[in-house]
Image: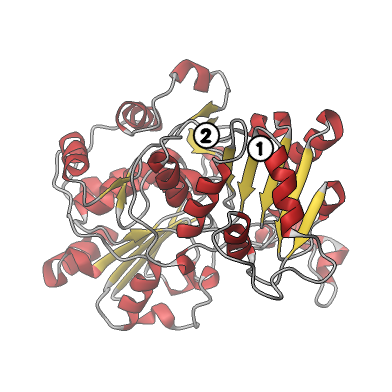
Amino acid sequence: MAADRLQDVLRQHGPDAIAVIGSNRTTNEENYLLGRFTRTVLGTNNLDHHRTADYPSLVRALTEAKATDRYASIENILEAPSIFLVGNDPTHQHPLVAHQIRQAVRLHNARLYLLNSREIKLQRQASHSVMLKPVGEPEAIRALAGMQAPAVGLVLENAGSLDTLREKLQKESDTLIIFGDEIRGKDVADLVRWGLTLAGRTQFVALGDYANSRGASDLGLLPDVLPGYASLADQAARTHYESIWQASIPSRPGRDIPSILKGVQSDEIKALLVFGSNPVKTFHLPQQYLSKLTFLMVAELFPTETTEHAHVVLPAASFAEKSGTITNTCGQVQAVKKTMRKASTQSDLEILLILARLLGQKWPYQSADDVLREIIAQVPGYAMALPNLLLGHAVSTQPAGMPPELASPGLIFSSRDSLFTSGTLSRYSWALNAVDEAKKPHGHIF
């Protein structure tokens, strides 16, 4: 049914009447195939996902600075003599990063410097902390870099000094800079340029939510970027992937998610495919927002606000029911191993292979391993030793593409849902819903 309805839309309205929203929870192999499916089978670049960090701008800034060896790993955080955290709340959004920061301070006497517009627990470990007015981080970075004088009221009263922060960081060496969704677009470039003027070997980490936000971005779930951050405007990059995929790729950039949603309302987008995402909740859509669609297909684990409006819901497998890889927020690839037998579900990868075949494209993949080998061989920055990955090691990547500048800062936003307390999955657990705390009025244990 899904294939038939998609073919109807393609015949009547053309490929740009279809859009695809991907996930920052699906595997690298699934993200790579979703990009290929959208661009070559459906014939459109209308492809995006909920972007929780501006990885493309970090890649662009480090590529321009010829410093693509400055991506930090999770291990580097523990070893860093000084850490500069801009925005974010790692304790709730990145527990492992927060643990590494605390261990670096406690065990290795690292100095922690904070620049934030909200109070966070890591202030207890900070050598110097500056509290800002809401969304003041970009302006503070420009002030630190000497690009402009800080506006009156930027720094809250009795909440630290930017001048003192600058002086302390200039005395440090080998500082590791970590930043959240508050820094995006040109602000990332400003932070990188200034950071590289500090003594020693400055390294960088962009913090994005969820298991595979970095992998979704790296593998091209974006309307204007191919896997490895090659711009669609780059003819050589398009030719590279056209030869691998044996199909043409549209040269015009597609719609981002805000444009996709506007297209739904203007009746320009007739069909929407959603893989592992819940746009109704994420983008706070009115209840009947998607009702104008001719066709809505959702691949998902559980019922969501979005599946309520779907014409077809395909039950997808969880991470424990499939194999593949993910890329953590530091750009390190890790293997996911199947630990459970599937129960009447298919992985997103299997769903894509079946849909492609039903739409006339039989791809030469039998498993996630086949896709992984292609990624390793063909995606810039992802060349890695497969044995190291299969032995359980986290293998670092070094993307060095030149993606376009961020069109709109509003495209990047963290969910700010404390990751493990959002209820995205836990609200469907009968065991959690059975405990007394869950039964109390307005009480939520998740």
The disc, 2 or 1, on the residue closer to the chain's N-terminal end is 2
Mark 2 and mark 1: span between their CA atoms?
11 Å
Q: Is residue 61 visible?
A: yes
Disc number for residue 70: 2
Residue lying furthest top = 387
Q: Quadrant of residue 423?
A: bottom right
Disc number for residue 175: 1
Q: Secondary structure at mark 1?
A: strand
Along the line of sight, which residue is nearer the eye, 177 or 236?
177
**Position of 283 compared to 348: left or right?**
right
Taking the spot 64% from the left edge, 68% from the top edge, the residue there is 150
Disc number for residue 67: none
Along the line of sight, which residue is nearer the eye, 262 or 180?
180
Taking the spot 74% from the left edge, 37% from the top edge, the residue there is 100
**Position of 3 compared to 336: left or right?**
left
Q: Secondary structure at mark 2?
A: loop
Quarter of the image where the N terminus is located: bottom left
| Tag nearer the camera, 2 or 1 | 1
Q: Is residue 441 above or below residue 221?
A: below
Expressed as whole percent of the image width and height from the top left, the position of residue 115 reads 71, 57
Q: Is residue 295 above or below residue 42?
A: below
Q: Quadrant of residue 112?
A: top right
Q: Is residue 309 above or below residue 86?
A: below
Expressed as whole percent of the image width and height from the top left, the position of residue 397 reads 47, 31
**Position of 254 compared to 213: left or right?**
left
Taking the spot 51% from the left edge, 54% from the top edge, the residue there is 190
